[in-house]
Structure formats: C-alpha cells, structure tokens
Image: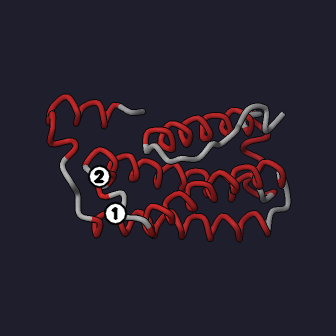
Amino acid sequence: MDQKIDDITENSGDSALMIVPFAKFLPLINEIGNFFNETIELVEAAEHNKRTCEILKNRVHVAELAIRELREKRKDREDFFNKINYIRLQELSTITKRIKNFISEISQMKTLIKYLKEKSIKKVFKELCGEFDVYINLLSFSINVEIADELE
C-alpha cells in the first residue's frame, strides 16, 4: 500500500522532501471536496445500509475538513507541501473515491446484490477504513478517526 512512498524515499533521498507548489495540490484538494459532496448526496438517497454509509461519509468528511484546514493555513504549513505528501494526498483522493463508489453500490438494491452474494460488505468496509486510516496518519493530520467496532 505504501510501496510507492517507500520507493520514492529510497530512490530519491532528500528529493522526496522537495517542495511541491501548492498549485499542484489544489486539484487534489478540490477532488476530495467534490467526493465528499457526492458522498453526502449518496447517503441522503440511500435505501439500504444507511448506518454503514453514514459511517463512511463521516470518514470522508474528516478528510475533507483536514484538507480544507490545510488549504486555509497553507502559509503556516509550507513544509507539508512536498513530494511525499503530494503522493499521499493522491492516494487519499483515490481511497476517498473508492469509499464514495462503495457507498453508491451498497446503498441501492440493484448494486447491493453483488455484496450480499459475497457477504463482503463488512470485509470491504474494513479494508477501505484501514487504507483510509493509513493515509490520514501518513499525512499527519491532527485528527482522530475511531473505527473500532463501528460496524458491529
């Protein structure tokens, strides 16, 4: 999961901490905000698995809030905008999109059936939460996302 970052760090040494212009981060920041807005709409329209969808929406909301704060306080956090964190933010955006897509699939009957057959909603939920937590922690956001027994 974090192999890309490990590879960059090993192969480039100090260049992994090289400053990346904020303008390159902006599309990723906007993308995560858009995924959150889409997630809100999906959860509001959910027919099934509303609790699971709500939990996942809250996680995406946490990421969106942290990213928004980062955007607002970018002058104070200039050291954040480096190559490693750029890659981490790309990965967070990817996992946020996967969460949005999962909510879309499990919240409507027509797409829910594939998960019911596989009995995998809980499994995918835990995988998505685990990956999400990794990138939130790697980005060193000062937030605490509790997942222990959320789905139980």
> The C terminus appears in which quarter of the rendering?
top right
Q: Which residue is mark 1?
A: 25
Q: Residue at x 46, y 66 (%)?
A: 31
Nearer-the-camera pick, 122 or 26: 26
Q: Position of residue 135 (x, y in %)?
A: 47, 42
Q: Position of residue 107 (x, y in %)?
A: 77, 57
| Tag shown at residue 4 | none
Residue density around tag 1, few if under 14, some if 14–19, many if 20 or more, within 10 Å: some
136 on left or right of 102: left
18 on left or right of 126: left
Residue density around tag 2, few if under 14, some if 14–19, many if 20 or more, within 10 Å: few
Q: Position of residue 112 (x, y in %)?
A: 76, 50
**1 in relation to 39, above or below:** above
Contact (Cβ within 8 Å) of mark 2 with mark 1: no
Q: Secondary structure at mark 2?
A: helix
Q: Residue at x 77, y 33 (%)?
A: 119
| Tag shown at residue 79 | 2
Amino acid carrying label 1: it is Phe
* Nearest-to-viewer mark from 2 and 1: 2
112 on left or right of 99: right
Instruction: Specify the quadrant of the image occupied by residue 60.
Output: bottom right
**151 in relation to 87, above or below:** above
Q: How is the image coloured?
A: secondary structure
Amino acid carrying label 2: it is Asp
Q: Residue at x 60, y 41 (%)?
A: 128
Q: Position of residue 93 (x, y in %)?
A: 46, 55
Nearer-the-camera pick, 98 or 69: 69
Nearer-the-camera pick, 112 or 75: 75
> The N terminus appears in which quarter of the rendering?
top left
Q: Residue at x 83, y 55 (%)?
A: 50
